[in-house]
Image: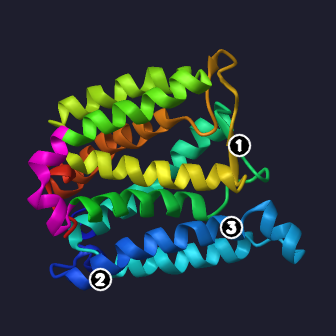
Amino acid sequence: MKDFKSFQLFINSSPTKANMTMAGWLFLILTPLVLWLDSDLFLNDYGFNGRWLANGLTLVYFLWLFYVSGTELRKLIFTMVIISYIGELIFCSLLGMYHYRTVHIPLYVPLGHAIVYASGYIYANTGWALTNKTLLKKVFPLLFILIFLIPVLFFNDIFTLIFSVFFFLILRRKKYDPLYYFIAFCVIFIELLGTGFNCWKWVPETFGAIPAANPPMGAVFFYAGGDVIIAKLVSIWDGRKKTPAANSAG
């Protein structure tokens, strides 16, 4: 275990600001491209399933992102891939809360979860975000209350009503760190695109009883909740009590 914790693959003490900035922009550019490649729209227009292209592009970007990331973020990315795949098996395959365009979970999904998660960290650690952290702590809660209320009021999204409460409970525990809001924005971005391209679809009633929009904004809770698990795992990995949310992307 000691050898694994010090494995050079996870060590990078000097990530560059230029690479982190590029990673932030590439997330915004590549996400719609990847989801378009896996869509029925692409299949109908070009006559073949573009999922293998979506998987390949995501894998290449994931490996590059891992390479340019600092030690802490490398560990988070690695851990997130494992946790997200387990989460897919539970929430999709077992509980049936949503389903993909085809029977199988695409390869780009667990890698994509890690990319979404890492992108939130990168945005939260930009100079602008750090400089305006106090202001963001005041603005973000109001903005997210509005984001949650719209689907609840207009689409009867009880799923979001329930899980938005849990989201804010986690945020309270984390002292409303803007990091979690940035991750949530990345989640909303990819959820709107993914459901818009029909790459996946949330069921109208979760567990056959809880009305949910497609997508439900309350899905951001599962990323915030996932951070609690990942933080604990990375702390055990490092043999220390330390929360990744308190660290920079490097």
As drawn, is 99 to the left or to the right of 140? right
Q: Earlier in the sequence, mark 1 or mark 3?
A: 3
Quickly name the residue at label 2: 19
Mark 2 nearby-residue class (10 Å; few <14, some 14–19, many ≥20): some
Q: Which image quarter holds the C terminus?
A: bottom left
Quickly name the residue at label 3: 36
Q: Please state which of residues 72 and 21 is positioned toward the viewer in this rendering.
A: 21
Q: Earlier in the sequence, mark 2 or mark 3?
A: 2
Question: Is label 1 or label 3 in front?
Answer: 3
- The amino acid type found where label 1 is placed reads His
Position above or below: 44 against 176: below
Quickly name the residue at label 1: 99
Position above or below: 109 against 83: below
Residue at point 60% right, 43% down? 89
Q: Please state which of residues 31 and 244 is positioned toward the viewer in this rendering.
A: 31
Q: Write down the region rendered in magenta.
A: 125-138
Question: Which quadrant would residue 143 be assigned to in this image?
Answer: top left
Query: Residue 203: x and y, percent?
Result: 70, 32
Residue at point 39% right, 74% down? 25
As drawn, is 193 to the left or to the right of 150? right
- Marks 2 and 3 sit apart, C-alpha to C-alpha, by 25 Å
Question: Which quadrant would residue 9 be assigned to in this image?
Answer: bottom left
- The amino acid type found where label 3 is placed reads Trp
Whether tag 2 and tag 3 are in contact, CB under 8 A, the answer is: no
Label 2: which secondary element:
helix
Q: Please state which of residues 176 and 108 is positioned toward the viewer in this rendering.
A: 176
- Give yes or no for residue 133 being in the magenta stretch: yes
- The amino acid type found where label 2 is placed reads Asn
Residue at point 43% right, 64% down? 115
Query: Residue 78: x and y, percent?
Result: 38, 63
